[in-house]
Image (spheres, grey):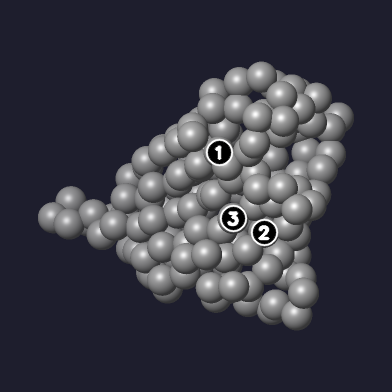
Amino acid sequence: MVRVDVTEHIEATPAEVWELIGDPTALSGMAEECVTMQWSRGSNGPRVGARFRGHNRQGWRRWTTSCTVVEYEPGRALSWDVAFGPLAVARWGYRLEDGGVDGGTTVHESFEDHRSAVLRALGPVVRGTGDTEGLNRANMVATLARLKARAEA
């Protein structure tokens, strides 16, 4: 299983950063591939078990995923599982740490690839890359840079 972790130090309090990432549907303005996210199946806010749909794009390619919040610790951690139809795709997450004596907040963004061999083989067609790890790492760096700019503004 491929796992990618990216970390960024932000000169803002954990509470200020959480305001920007504590609701995954608000991340669409910051996440590189995500166009929009909408609560679904009766969910209207973040909590374990809440569901939302992600509408994504990479170049001319477009796709929609179903997501389920699997970890929600306000002010500290958020993660969700992603599926394409009945097939597991990934787990995405954010974890915040108080910056300690230096102040600010350290943000960790993570991705775990949960795709089957068949979905991994289809990856280049769906997303336009055979390097999921490299593309996701670059996208995560860009997402955290946007988060940093917003939180520090």
Q: Which residue is mark 1?
A: 113
In the shown orientation, is residue 18 left or right of residue 54? Answer: left
Q: Position of residue 10 (x, y in %)?
A: 36, 49
Asked whether residue 82 is in view, the answer is: yes
Give the residue displayed 46% in from the left and 44% down from the top.
110
Q: Are marks 2 and 1 in contact (CB under 8 Å)?
A: no
Q: Earlier in the sequence, mark 2 or mark 1?
A: 2
Q: Which residue is mark 3?
A: 81
In the shown orientation, is residue 119 left or right of residue 90? Answer: right
SS class of the residue under badge 1?
strand
Q: Earlier in the sequence, mark 3 or mark 1?
A: 3
Q: Are marks 2 and 3 in contact (CB under 8 Å)?
A: yes
Q: Is residue 88 above or below residue 16?
A: above
Q: Amino acid at mark 3?
A: Asp
Toward the viewer: 63 or 49?
49
Q: Which mark is residue 67?
A: 2
Give the residue displayed 72% in from the left and 30% down from the top.
118
Q: Earlier in the sequence, mark 2 or mark 3?
A: 2
Q: Amino acid at mark 2?
A: Cys
